Image (cartoon, helix red, strand yellow):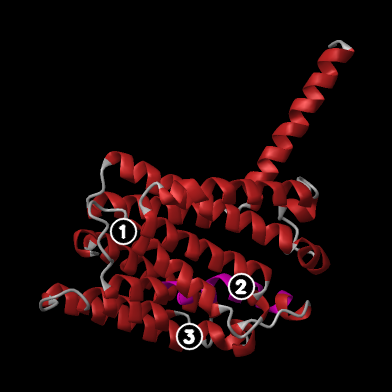
Amino acid sequence: MGTPEQSTAGGAGMRLAGRVGGLAGSCHPGPVVAVTVLMVALAVTAGQSAAGCVLTGAAVLTGQLSVGWCNDAFDARRDIAAGRHGKPVVDGTVGVTEVWVAAYAALVLCVPLSFASGLWAGAVHLAGVAAAWAYDLRLKATAWSWAPYAVGFAALPAFVALGLPGHPWPAWWVVTAGALVGVGAHLGDVLPDIRGDLATGVRGWPHRLGPNGALLLPVPLVAASAALVLGPAGPPGRWGVAVLVVTALLAVAGTVLGRRWEQLAFAAAVAVAAVDVALLLLRGTRIA
């Protein structure tokens, strides 16, 4: 049996580990990791240096962390009212104040890391992060809830392009595709919880569409595919046409079958989103 000092130290260590785990869980780790990895991969394919890729990843990571923590901290009262167990703040694993402190700390770190890639690159990335914070704090419950997603996702490839040597402006089609993927991500993020949100008074754009809005989910993602295939100079080629046909068929199948089985609409959207990610990385050398 341990001494009282050992027991106290062990208990403190367990509490600290619990808080760290709670913070990790409340930052929305899935999207944070996915977006960061994708932007680092895009930086690599676009031709950024090793140091540039590290800076890009660090800036995107801190920005995404700040947004995720802000979201959970601000929504804590509503999540508790809706009984959304599984969220660290709701389950009491971590306190709301601690999550707010983490959000602001990540945001402060994001500023110099963003500007390390250049003045315009930093300004564009921080504009995207600011749009995401505006969504969390205000626009989520309005008809303009889609706009921060469009701005935030458009800013990400633009940030990568502006971080290249010479700081070139991003191609219009990659910014457009980013915005469209953002709108699709907004639909996909909101619709699983739409009934609980409606019960607590949230009235964003997807909520105004109603639960059947899931049927629209693949539409902006297919439009993003079209921008990525048709936007760059030159003919799309056979593979480009094939990609558009496949994504269109997936969207139609998801929309038709989704009327009976809602999850199929999400599955089709995920498949189209995966195609968009692959296209973005394949087009990496031409984003600027």
Question: On the image, numbered disc 1 is attached to which residue?
Answer: 162
Residue 142 occupies which quadrant of the picture? bottom right
Residue at x 54% of width, y 45% of height: 109
Give percent across and percent down for residue 63: 52, 54
**Quadrant containing the C terminus in the rendered view:** bottom left
What is the magenta segment's predominant secondary structure?
helix
Q: Is residue 255 rendered to the left or right of residue 175?
A: right
Regarding residue 29, the answer to whether it shows in the image is: no
Residue at x 78% of width, y 22% of height: 10
Q: Are marks 2 and 3 in contact (CB under 8 Å)?
A: no
**Type of amino acid under label 2:** Pro
Regarding mark 3 in the picture, which secondary structure is present there? Answer: helix
- Residue at the front extreme, as displayed: 119
Q: Which-is-in-front pick, marks 1 and 2?
A: 1
Query: Of marks 2 and 3, which one's residue comes earlier in the chain?
Result: 2
Give percent across and percent down for residue 102: 66, 46
52, above or below 135, in the image: above
Residue at x 72% of width, y 62% of height: 74
- Mark 1 to mark 2: distance in Å? 35 Å
**Type of amino acid under label 1:** Leu
Nearer-the-camera pick, 156 or 117: 117
Residue 168 occupies which quadrant of the picture? bottom left
Give percent across and percent down for residue 38: 37, 55
- Mark 2 to mark 3: distance in Å? 14 Å
**Type of amino acid under label 3:** Leu
Q: Residues within 10 Å of mark 3 (few under 14, many from 20)?
A: many
Regarding mark 2 in the picture, which secondary structure is present there? Answer: helix
Q: Which-is-in-front pick, marks 1 and 3?
A: 1
The range drawn in magenta is 181-196
Question: On the image, numbered disc 3 is attached to which residue?
Answer: 216
**Quadrant containing the N terminus in the rendered view:** top right
